[in-house]
Amino acid sequence: MTVIVAEGDNCADILAQLAVALAPPAAPIEPTEPTALDERNVLDRFLIERTVAQAGHSVTQRKLFDAYREWAIANGYRPYHPKHVARVLGERLTSERTLAGRLYTGLRLKRRPRRT
């Protein structure tokens, strides 16, 4: 709830102040840019190292989490809980809900590096 305090005892003055206070902004509010990936963040490092942004591709939430978990263990990190991973990835990636579960779109997993 917004409280507007108008000064003056004249109704015209009060209405003019209300009109100014309730007027839309002069310029449209620009949407904020998506959060930039930070390679110091473990989940962001995973996205940088194991995924590629590519139109027309998608990956299921399960496959993405399994790849993250495998990557985290291989790199000496304790994997985050799936709910935490889903929340963070939801802030960074485009997704849609399907009958099969959440699908992250515009993204594909990189092939795993071969171990010799």
Image (cartoon, rainbow, N blue to C red):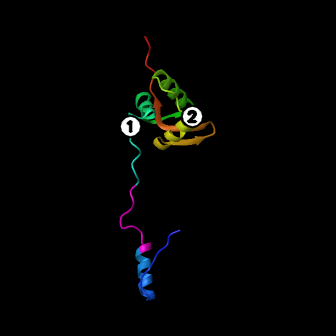
Residue placed furthest toward the left: 27
32 up-or-down from 82: above or below: below
Q: Quadrant of the C terminus?
A: top left
- Residue 97 placed where, x, y %? 58, 42
Q: CA distance from mark 1 to mark 2?
A: 20 Å
In the foreground, 19 or 14: 14
- Residue 70 placed where, x, y %? 51, 24
- Residue 73 placed where, x, y %? 50, 23
Residue type at tag 2: Pro
- Residue 81 placed where, x, y %? 56, 33
The part of the chain drawn in magenta is 21-30
Residue 38, disc = 1
- N-term-proximal mark, 1 vs 2: 1
In the foreground, 68 or 102: 68
Q: Secondary structure at mark 1?
A: loop
The 10 Å Cα crowd at callout 2, few under 14, some 14 to 19, many 20 or more, is some
Residue placed furthest toward the right: 99
Disc 2: which residue? 82
Q: Quadrant of residue 19?
A: bottom left
Answer whether labels 1 and 2 touch (C-beta < 8 Å).
Answer: no
The 10 Å Cα crowd at callout 1, few under 14, some 14 to 19, many 20 or more, is few
50 up-or-down from 89: above or below: above
**Residue drawn at point x = 53 percent, y = 41 percent:** 87
How would you classify the magenta stretch by its main secondary structure?
loop
